[in-house]
Image (cartoon, coloured by chain):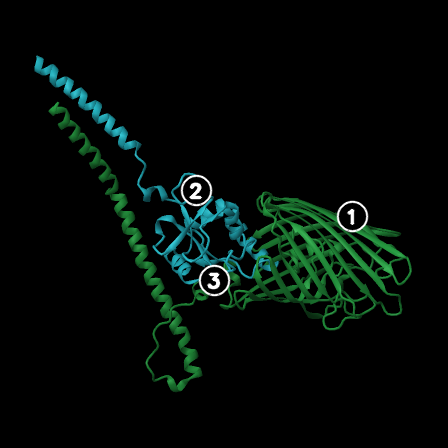
Amino acid sequence: MHLLLKAGRAVGRTFMIGAATIFALAALPPATEDSKAGNVAVVVRMELPVDNLSFGEVRQLLLGDRQFWTAGVRVTLLMRAPAAREREVILKTVYRMSETEFRRYWIEKVFRAEAPTGPKIVYSNEAATELVGSIPGAVAFVDANQVPKGLKVLRIDGRLPGDKGYPLH
Amino acid sequence: MRLGLLLTCLLGRIVAGQQRAAVLNPDHEIVQQLIERVKQLEAEVRELKAQRAASASAPAQAVSAPATAAQPAPEPARPAPSQTMPDAMPGPSAGFAGMQFRGFSDVQYHASDLRGETHSFSLGQFNLFITSRLSDRLSVLAEAVVEADDHNAVGIDLERLLLQYTPSDYFNVSFGRYHTDIGWYNTAYHHSTWLQTATGRPFLFEFEDRGGILPVHNVGISVNGRIPSGKLGLRYVAEIGNGRASPSRPEGVQNVHDENNGKAVNFGIMARPEWLRAFRAGFSVYRDRLTPEGMPKVGQTILAAYAVYQASLFEFLNEAVFIRNAIGETTRVIHSPGFYTQVSRRFGAVRPYFRYQYVNVPDSDPLFPGVGLRYGPSLGIRYDVSEFAAFKVQYDRTDRRRLSGFNGVTTQLSFTF
């Protein structure tokens, strides 16, 4: 009987410790890759002397209102092709336009001589990052989990992809 | 106690096992496989593009240098960025790597009770818009328009031709023929009816060859750029050119010859606040001297102001222009005010709109005495048949000083391609 009571107390303690362990594991922050999932990174070349942009500056870049980096290098916008998730995120969060409105916006922009050309279309994140590496001033908006080494991910209002409050997701 | 530790270890293993299972579950594996497959396909696409680029260049080499045909084939060239990524201009406009084309045009039917006018189908302007980037800082823009005049004769006009040099956001200089930066409408829509909500321009901004009273086109130099102003989004423009010819001359725009040595100048400032993207406001001052044949010189000053709100759903355009013509050495000055206001709201593909316009040129004006006072409302509906085509129906009522008013109905199919 005494042994049975002892075993019962031991099982109870074990369950308490086990439950505490489970809660502790659940409270741990998720893995880094997962925290970036769905985020769109703003990617440029390492040499570009910019590390952080305000969200307003990102809008100016994407709207073609700002066409030069501070270094005097022309901005080349690289946008994913229609139906890509990264493009949808950018249209929704930055342009706040539908696909049709986006196309019309750039027709007007070029027609009004406010920009010499619209954004360039890229068909994969890999192609986008490759071109960022080869075109000075190029900026791409790609899946944050697919940024290769050797490129710089810009902070937006001080936040990197995966950080709480990062706007491009 | 030992039993407790044993159970804790067991639980720990179970939890760890669950985590591993979450990582190694079948869905995750499938996703990983798909990613790998996408990467493979991307690599294949790149390879195919490289081969296509190499084969595309092969015929040119064969034509230009047949003697080298026996030499080993060159390695597949890596596609240039311009070949691999066309601009975001929609498909139909895709042109050569260094040159972009876009067209605008319209067909309309107009009926009016104005004496002397007949109900007619008419071809609108066939507008061929071309841009080309020569380098990071140099680009060319041209807008060539083929159109028929009132006698059904077709002619070609080069409406815009600009060589643009843009070293920074704060300084952009253009040389050539441009649309004068007076007000907003003139530089917003140029020669495209598809971009406009209504079937045509307000009378105030009508082209010179259609009886317009403003110097819509100019040949010279135009400078514009951003003004460091934070979220206010200020911009400036400064222009110097030949100005418009006096109405007594046959051609309204002085493309190659100015009627006098004085040059027209225009200065403007405009705001596009970051916190209200759809809003634009601006002010400009234009100054020129005209020398009509057999008449005293006319010193012309044009003040223009606008406040425009143009969002996807709602549009509210307001512009006012004040023309001051000072005649010769006398103190005689003629003032001609004009304005229009336009409001529209989009409901899906349908956008009803209303415009009211007013222009009052005194009969004593030395340049446009025949324009007089004209005012009235326009009411219309624009229906976007597709992304690049619109159907519009518009009713216009125009009242005039000492002349009977008249009504008009215009239906228009406008499109871009």
Residue nearer the viewer, B391 or B246: B246
The residue nearer to you, when weighing B209 against A122, is A122
Q: Which residue corresponds to mark 2? A: A166
- Secondary structure beneath disc 2? loop
Q: Which residue is at a point 42% across and 80% down the rendered structure image?
A: B61
Chain A visual colour: cyan
Give me the C-alpha separation between circle 3 and circle 1: 45 Å
In the picture, measured across the screen, residue B348 lies left or right of residue B317, that is left
The image position of residue B154, as x and y in percent, is 70, 70
Tag 3: amino acid? Pro
Left or right position of A74 against A85:
right
Task: Specify the colour of chain B.
Answer: green
To which chain does the residue with label 3 belong? B
- To which quarter of the image does residue A10 belong? top left
Instruction: From the image, tell me which residue sits under label 3.
Output: B86
x and y, in percent, of residue A163 in the image: 39, 41
Q: Position of residue A140 (x, y in %)?
A: 44, 54
